[in-house]
Image: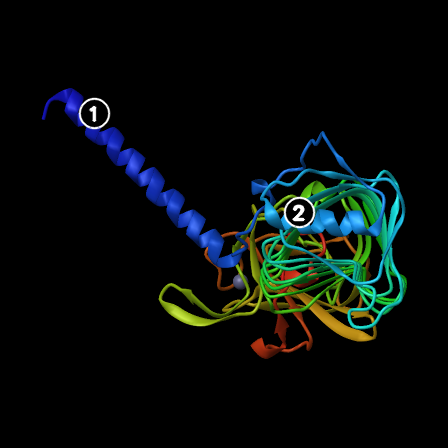
């Protein structure tokens, strides 16, 4: 082979290697985050040439027109409108609200539902107030865009329901619900929240993530609480920690125990294979240099400091009481422990240093959250859902 051909072959080989590597990482990612719908294919639209909506009939016509074409004219609200039945949107519908209201009167059946976005629907509402006795917006396998919307549900149900595969984008606005949740995310649905949107459901969780495989991306928002159904591979991302999220239930407020080092080299697993041996892994391994500080994940009392040369190495366990339950965090393979049994520690105080003592191949922290202070795998929890500030990912 000539020199230049060899060069080309080498480059091709490199390109092939690069792409096969890319594919591996992409498919690996997809196995843990199989959300495929994306708001990237829909953008906020800068609209001109509005049609006016002055009556309920105008609104009904707009909804009907949306069905006929994939890109109907946008509409602008010129009056408050009261619906006597839910409107099903099965096309593209943009409504600029001009600060007007769409409310529900009392009617039977789907009492109070304002809009249902059908499976082929796309609804964009901006500068509008919507209030329903029941659910205000239901979106199913489609797109829902809310920009500077005030949505309120008086009654039993929710303001926004993202059903199977739905994608919703919320920019700014204010969302309240008196009796139930504001936003519910079901299977494979996703939400993006930005523009300092605020959520307040005083008598329930603001957001309920049912999943499986639902995800929510926060960029800027204020949320009091989120309930996430455990074990359903649901995700919450708090990008750059910009959103204020009061609490995530059933997650507790455990801190990531190694400041600055957030790489988890091995996850909690029921059947981890390591060096050809498959067995449960009761914690997460956080890779960090020897001597790096380990902090108390939550306030509590040190129950013991121990050394187990064949297993945990130098380790300690802290007992925590929260919401009427007892939890234990365990920190293993330390090079040094700077607290004593019986000592109370506050959240975030240094308790030890990263090491590689015991059964370990390199410096890391093996971190466990347990329901019992024993050695049974059955009493360990996947720490991920309990760590509030693992950046930026919470995994359930
Ligand atoms: Zn480990």
Q: Nearer the viewer, residue 346 or 65?
A: 65
Disc 2 residue lies near ligand 1 with CB under 8 A:
no
Local crowd at mark 1 within 10 Å, few (<14), some, or many (≥20)?
few
Name the secondary structure under disc 2: helix
The residue at 21%/25% (across/down) is: 7
Q: Is mark 1 within 8 Å of ligand 1?
A: no
Image quarter of the N terminus: top left
Q: Quadrant of residue 313?
A: bottom right
176 to the left or right of 168: right
Tell me the quarter of the picture where residue 181 sits.
bottom right
Disc sitting over residue 65 in the figure: 2
Earlier in the chain: of badge 1 and badge 2, it is 1
Q: 10 Å neighbourhood of mark 2: few (<14), some, or many (≥20)?
A: some
**x then y, percent, for residue 239:** 68, 43
Q: In the rendered image, which residue does mark 1 sit on?
A: 7
Q: Hey, which quadrant is residue 301 in on the image? A: bottom right
Whether residue 42 is visible here, answered yes or no, is yes
Q: Nearer the viewer, residue 391 or 155?
A: 155
Residue at image point 31% right, 34% down: 15
Q: In the rendering, at what x and y percent does residue 96 appear?
A: 78, 39
Q: Is residue 318 above or below residue 143?
A: below
Q: Nearer the viewer, residue 295 or 72?
A: 72
- Can residue 171 be seen in this snapshot? no
Q: Can you say which quadrant of the picture contains the C terminus? A: bottom right
């Amino acid at each position: 082979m000539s020199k230049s051909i060899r060069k080309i072959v080498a480059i091709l080989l490199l390109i092939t290697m690069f792409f096969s590597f890319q594919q591996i990482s992409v498919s690996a990612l997809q196995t843990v985050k199989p959300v495929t719908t994306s708001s990237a294919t829909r953008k906020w639209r800068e609209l001109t040439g509005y049609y006016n909506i002055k009556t309920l009939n105008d609104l009904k016509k707009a909804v009907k027109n949306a069905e006929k074409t994939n890109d109907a004219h946008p509409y602008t609200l010129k009056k408050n409108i009261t619906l006597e039945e839910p409107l099903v949107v099965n096309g593209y519908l943009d409504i600029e609200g001009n600060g007007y209201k769409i409310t529900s009167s009392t009617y039977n059946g789907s009492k109070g539902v304002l809009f249902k976005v059908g499976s082929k629907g796309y609804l964009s509402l901006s500068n509008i107030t919507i209030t329903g006795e029941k659910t205000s917006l239901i979106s199913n396998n489609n797109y829902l865009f809310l920009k500077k919307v005030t949505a309120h549900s008086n009654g039993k149900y929710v303001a926004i329901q993202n059903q199977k595969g739905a994608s919703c984008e919320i920019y700014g606005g204010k969302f309240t619900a008196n009796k139930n949740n504001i936003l519910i995310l079901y299977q494979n649905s996703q939400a993006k929240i930005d523009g300092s949107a605020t959520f307040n459901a005083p008598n329930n969780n603001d957001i309920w993530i049912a999943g499986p495989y639902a995800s929510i991306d926060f960029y800027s928002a204020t949320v009091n609480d989120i309930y996430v159904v455990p074990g359903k591979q649901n995700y919450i991302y708090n990008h750059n920690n910009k959103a204020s999220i009061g609490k995530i239930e059933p997650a507790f407020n455990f801190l990531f125990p190694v400041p600055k080092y957030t790489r988890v080299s091995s996850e909690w697993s029921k059947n981890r294979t390591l060096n050809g041996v498959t067995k449960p892994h009761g914690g997460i391994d956080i890779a960090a240099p020897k001597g790096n500080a380990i902090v108390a994940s939550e306030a509590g009392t040190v129950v013991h400091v121990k050394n187990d040369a064949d297993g945990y190495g130098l380790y300690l366990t802290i007992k925590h009481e929260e919401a009427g339950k007892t939890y234990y965090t365990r920190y293993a393979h330390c090079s040094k422990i700077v607290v004593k049994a019986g000592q109370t520690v506050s959240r975030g105080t240094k308790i030890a240093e990263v090491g590689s003592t015991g059964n370990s191949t390199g410096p890391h922290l093996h971190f466990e959250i347990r329901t019992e202070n024993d050695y049974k795998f059955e009493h360990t929890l996947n720490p991920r859902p309990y760590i509030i500030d693992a950046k930026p990912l919470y995994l359930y």
